[in-house]
Image (spheres, rainbow, N blue to C red):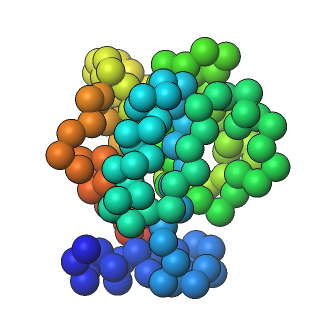
Amino acid sequence: MNLAYEEGLAWGRASRTGAHVNAKPSILIVDDDPAVLGSLSFMLEAEGFDVCAIGDVCELLSCDSICGHDCLVVDYCMPVMNGFDVLRWLRERKVDAPALMITASPEAKLRARALEAGFARVIEKPLLDGALGDDIKAVISAPR
């Protein structure tokens, strides 16, 4: 982890949440594919993130504690609710962390709609070479 990132992360966390600046960044992942959820959790934990992984939208809807995450990673295509519906539901509950959409089919129309809906970025599956971790670090440390 580089110093500029650490300083940006500390500033971003402290200014948004008042949290202790040495805490691990907390990431909420919502994806219905157990293999993707497991590999993303493992990869992000190895990169130093604290991960809350939810594989069932119904489980998310019944969560009591969904606030306090530094970044949201939401799959686009899921049963019950798609990624847009999940983000809308989270925003209605005052979860204001930056959100990234992951999808296997990121057509231009979907990307535009995702940005309009409030996603910071759209990332194409498969997620390779630490790109997701880099994108998370970028949106966490960016001023909002």
Image quarter of residue 30: top right
Residue drawn 70% across and 37% down? Answer: 60
Give the residue at x 17% y 46%.
129
Residue at the image point whose x is 49% and y is 19% from the top: 77
Question: In the displayed structure, does residue 54 sit left or right of residue 58?
Answer: left
Q: Quadrant of residue 59?
A: top right
Q: Nearer the viewer, residue 23 or 139?
A: 23
Q: Is residue 40 above or below residue 15?
A: above
Give the image location of residue 41, x and y in percent. 44, 47
Instruction: State the residue lying farthest toward the left.
Output: 129
Residue 31 visible within the image: yes
Q: From the image, which quarter does the N terminus lie in? A: bottom left
In this picture, residue 119 sits left or right of residue 121: right
Q: Is residue 101 visible?
A: no
- In front: 84, or 104? 104
Q: Give the total number of marks visible in the rendering.
A: 0
* Residue 12 picture location, percent across and down: 47, 74
Q: Residue at x 44, y 62 (%)?
A: 49
Looking at the picture, does residue 99 appear above or below residue 1?
A: above
Residue 53 in the image, given as x and y percentages of width and height = 56, 44
Q: Please state if 93 lies on the left or on the right of 32 as rendered.
A: right
Q: Quadrant of residue 6?
A: bottom left
